[in-house]
């Protein structure tokens, strides 16, 4: 079984304080995008994980955690082989590890025909990581609590394009939170629409990653003719530009956008959506759901 393992963006991320357990409460808007990894699953004689990045072929990979949680829940213990073709950078803030874990759960459920519901898979995902349940949503969602409580956001029209800018050096989530100041937090809003497109973790990350702050200012300058928004996803280090698809009605604007992307070494991506019980398909048809 071959599956696309997509990345996500945090279109905004607002922090509200700490829970009694020491985690940070937040409200965030998630969007799945058509950039990601490939994950292949097949039955075998022993459990194996093969990855194009050898440093990820370790017992600490979240794919193994997904496998163990699946086995604990279903009592299906047949050995499997995984092959992970990694494209999502490590420490990029776009949910690469969480996506792989969620994709693994979905793949196991289909491969062994255990018929676990979407709700059950989402609950199992919470045991793996905060972002994992997101990947069992439609692709556009609001995260509350510590980001793991997923609310559908069907009203979001997804009529934006995104341009990704990766960094050669990732950001550890623990570092992003350790540099927070008390005045970095935001008040809760009753209406999701009242939240501005801001990431409260930017203030923290930019305190020890001045290069990302400078990069954001540079991107704001070069994208200003298109009235685009520049933000940071998750805890970084990925910066992204968003602009409305409607401006592409002018061919000269489209050409200018493509030139800007090429000159600034960005990666153009689109939003992805799916129906309940299905999985995400990459629009360029490079990935299939069955082998």
Image: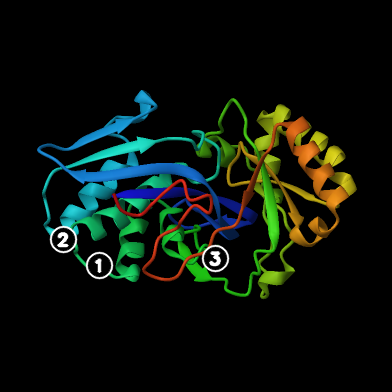
Q: Position of residue 113 (x, y in %)?
A: 19, 63
Secondary structure at badge 2 equals helix
Q: CA distance from mark 3 to mark 1?
A: 21 Å
- Secondary structure found at label 1: loop
Relative image position of residue 234 (x, y in whole percent) = 58, 47
Q: Which residue is mark 2?
A: 74
Residue 225 percent coordinates (x, y): 90, 47
* Image-quadrant location for residue 246: bottom right
User: Which residue is drawn at the image coordinates 72% and 53% (left, top)?
Assistant: 198
Q: Earlier in the sequence, mark 3 or mark 1?
A: 1
Q: Is residue 50 left or right of residue 186?
A: left
Q: Earlier in the sequence, mark 3 or mark 2?
A: 2
Q: Residue at x 21, y 48 (%)?
A: 68
Vertical comparison of 135 with 97: above or below:
below
Q: Are marks 2 and 1 in contact (CB under 8 Å)?
A: yes
Determine which of the numbered discs, if any, sits on residue 210 in the image.
none
Relative horizontal placement of residue 136, taking residue 237 as reference (left or right): left
> What residue is shown with label 3?
141
Tally of numbered tags: 3
Residue carrying label 1: 116
Left or right placement of residue 111 versus residue 146 in this view:
left
Q: CA distance from mark 3 to mark 2?
A: 28 Å
In the rendered view, tell whether residue 53 sits above or below residue 96.
above
- Comparing 173 with 30, the one in front is 30
Quadrant of residue 11 in the image?
Answer: bottom right
Residue found at x 11% / y 50%: 77
* First in residue order: circle 2 vs circle 1: 2
Q: Residue at the location (59% across, 56% down)?
A: 17
Q: Looking at the image, is 183 positioned above or below residue 236?
A: below
- Asked if the residues shown at circle 3 and circle 2 are in contact, with their CB atoms under 8 angstroms apart, the answer is no
Residue 130 x, y percent position in the rendering: 44, 53
Q: Secondary structure at mark 3?
A: strand
């Amino acid at each position: 079984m071959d599956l696309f393992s997509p990345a996500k963006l945090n279109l905004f991320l607002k922090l509200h304080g700490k829970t009694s357990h020491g985690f940070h409460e937040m409200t965030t808007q998630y969007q799945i995008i058509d950039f990601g990894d490939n994950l292949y699953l097949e039955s075998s004689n022993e459990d194996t994980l093969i990855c194009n990045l050898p440093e990820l072929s370790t017992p600490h990979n979240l794919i193994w955690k997904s496998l163990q949680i699946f086995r604990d829940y279903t009592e299906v213990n047949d050995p499997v082989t995984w092959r992970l073709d990694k494209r999502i950078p490590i420490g990029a803030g776009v949910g690469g590890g969480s996506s792989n874990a969620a994709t693994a759960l979905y793949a196991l459920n289909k491969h062994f025909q255990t018929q676990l519901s979407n709700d059950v898979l989402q609950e199992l995902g919470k045991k793996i990581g905060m972002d994992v349940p997101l990947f069992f949503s439609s692709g556009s969602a609001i995260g509350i609590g510590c980001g793991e409580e997923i609310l559908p956001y069907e009203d979001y029209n997804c009529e934006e394009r995104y341009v990704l800018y990766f960094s050669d050096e990732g950001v550890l989530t623990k570092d992003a939170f350790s540099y927070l100041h008390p005045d970095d937090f935001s008040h809760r809003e009753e209406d999701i629409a009242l939240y501005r497109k801001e990431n409260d973790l930017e203030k923290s990350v930019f305190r020890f990653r001045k290069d990302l702050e400078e990069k954001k200012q540079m991107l704001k300058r070069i994208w200003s003719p298109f009235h685009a928004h520049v933000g940071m996803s998750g805890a970084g280090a990925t910066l992204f530009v968003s602009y409305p698809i409607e401006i592409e009605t002018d061919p000269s604007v489209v050409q200018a956008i493509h030139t800007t992307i090429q000159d600034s070494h960005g990666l153009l991506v689109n939003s992805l959506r799916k129906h309940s019980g299905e999985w995400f398909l990459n629009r360029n048809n490079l990935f299939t759901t069955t082998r």
